[in-house]
Image: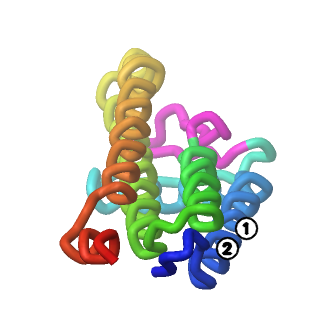
Amino acid sequence: MSHSGRTSLLGRVLGSLLLVLCGSLVVGERSYRFHEMAAAEWLISHVLSLRTMVLEAPDAPVLYAGDEGGFGRGIALTTGCSSALFIAMLAALSGVLLLFSTRRPTRILLGFALAAALIGGTNLGRLMLIVAMQHRYGDQGFGWTHILFGSVLMMAAALVALLLFLYMVNRTSAHDAEDDAL
C-alpha cells in the first residue's frame, strides 16, 4: 500500500475494470437478464423439481414452470426485476473507490464480490419463491410474493449488501494498524 496518499497501480487497473463492468452491466442488461433467468430455471428445476421452459420474448425472458399437469402462467424477468442494475451500482462504487482511495484493493474487491453475490443470490431465491408460490397458490401467490414480499426482500438484501460492503471496506486489521503507525 502506498503511504503517499496515492492509489496503487493495481487499484487503478482494477478500478477501471470495475467501471467497465458497470458499463457492461448497464449496456448488456438485457443479456444479463437472459443469463439470470437461465440460472433461475436451472435452480427451479433442480431444487423445486418443477418442469421449466424459458421463452425468449422480445422484451424479457419468460419462465414457465409446472408439473405433469402442464405449465401455469409465466413470469417475465424485466429490468426492474433483475439484479443487473444493483450489481452495476456496486461495481461503479467499487471502481471509484479503487481509483480514488488509498484503501487496499483486496478489501474493496472482496466487499464487491460478497455484496454482488448476496444481491444476485437473493434475486435468484426471490425468483424461485415467486415461481413456487405461483405454482401453489396461483395469481394470488404470485401477487403477494412478487409485489409485496419480493420487493421488501430485495430492498433488505440491497441494504445488507451495502452494509456488508462498507464493513469490508472499512474494517481494520492488525496489518492496517501497522501501516497506519508507519
Q: Position of residue 52 (x, y in %)?
A: 46, 53
- Image vertical order of residue 66 relative to residue 28, above or below: above
* Badge 2 element: helix
Amino acid type, label 2: Leu
Highlighted magenta segment, given as a residue range = 60-81
**Residue positioned 43% across, 39% down in the render:** 158
Q: Nearer the viewer, residue 112 or 168?
A: 168
- Image vertical order of residue 132 relative to residue 112, above or below: above
Determine the image quadrant of residue 177: bottom left
**Residue positioned 52% across, 44% down in the render:** 64
**Residue positioned 48% across, 76% down in the render:** 3
Residue 80 magenta: yes
* Badge 1 element: helix
Residue topped by disc 2: 17
Residue that protrudes farthest toward the front in the picture: 182
Marks 1 & 2, CB-CB < 8 Å contact: yes
Quadrant the C terminus occupies: bottom left
Q: Position of residue 76 (x, y in %)?
A: 61, 38
